[in-house]
């Protein structure tokens, strides 16, 4: 396992129940993606754990880990960051991207002027919002077709049309 391919997906907030499940705070759009993950890596040392069961629960995600037999063991994991190997994530349809693929892309306007780079992706429900920083000013760009003209992961660029008033 190459730690360069580990993707942060959330943080363990607390144990859930008495059988050793852990509650992970993550983005709701990640729920479907995480259903099939078989291994997670926890904490600063990225210790691997085997996922035996996974499910969405209210506003969080629950993992049952083979190495965590009960609530007491789950309690010791509270606050740890959770990572998955990028190669374990399912392939996306054309035009769909994981947030970690977009962070760091250079953002250019429709004329090629540099606006900064994608610093964060905010899930808002209706559509994501790309936070662009490092340019003349911070921009919050909605991830919609009329604004995001092109994403080129190979060139590490995003071409956009900034709506009037932004």
Image (spheres, helix red, strand yellow):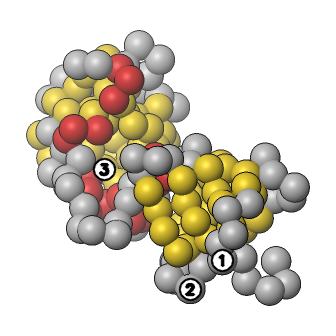
Q: Secondary structure at mark 2?
A: loop
Cα gap from disc 1 to disc 2, whole angstroms = 7 Å
Question: Residue 21 appears at what percent x and percent y?
Answer: 27, 41
Residue at 26 percent of width and 57 percent of height? 33
Q: Secondary structure at mark 3?
A: strand
- Left or right? Give the position of 26 relative to 130: left
Badge 1: how crowded within 10 Å, few (<14), some, or many (20+)?
some
Q: Quadrant of the N terminus?
A: top left
For label 2, the residue is: 146
Residue at 40 percent of width and 47 percent of height? 154
Whether 146 is drawn above or below 27: the answer is: below
Cα gap from disc 1 to disc 3, whole angstroms = 39 Å
Question: Residue 125 appears at what percent x and percent y?
Answer: 51, 77
For label 1, the residue is: 161
Q: Are marks 1 and 3 in contact (CB under 8 Å)?
A: no
Q: Are marks 1 and 2 in contact (CB under 8 Å)?
A: yes
**Number of marks present in the image shown:** 3
Name the image quarter holding residue 9.
Answer: top left
Comes first in the chain, label 1 or label 2: 2
Residue at 44 percent of width and 57 percent of height? 152
Whether 94 is drawn above or below 38: the answer is: below
Question: Residue 59 appears at what percent x and percent y?
Answer: 45, 64
For label 3, the residue is: 62
């Amino acid at each position: 396992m190459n730690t360069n391919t580990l993707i942060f997906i959330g943080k363990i907030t607390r144990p859930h129940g008495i059988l050793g499940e852990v509650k992970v705070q993550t983005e709701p759009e990640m729920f479907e993606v995480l259903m099939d993950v078989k291994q997670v890596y926890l904490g600063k040392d990225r210790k691997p754990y085997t996922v035996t069961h996974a499910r969405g629960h209210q506003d969080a995600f629950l993992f049952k880990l083979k190495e965590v037999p009960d609530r007491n063991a789950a309690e010791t994991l509270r606050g740890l960051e959770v990572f998955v190997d990028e190669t374990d994530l399912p392939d996306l349809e054309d035009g769909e991207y994981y947030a970690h693929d977009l962070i760091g892309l250079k953002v250019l306007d429709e004329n090629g002027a540099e606006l900064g780079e994608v610093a964060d992706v905010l899930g808002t429900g209706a559509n994501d919002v790309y936070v662009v920083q490092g340019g003349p000013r911070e921009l919050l760009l909605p991830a919609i077709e009329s604004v995001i003209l092109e994403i080129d992961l190979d060139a590490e660029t995003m071409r956009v049309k900034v709506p009037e008033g932004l």
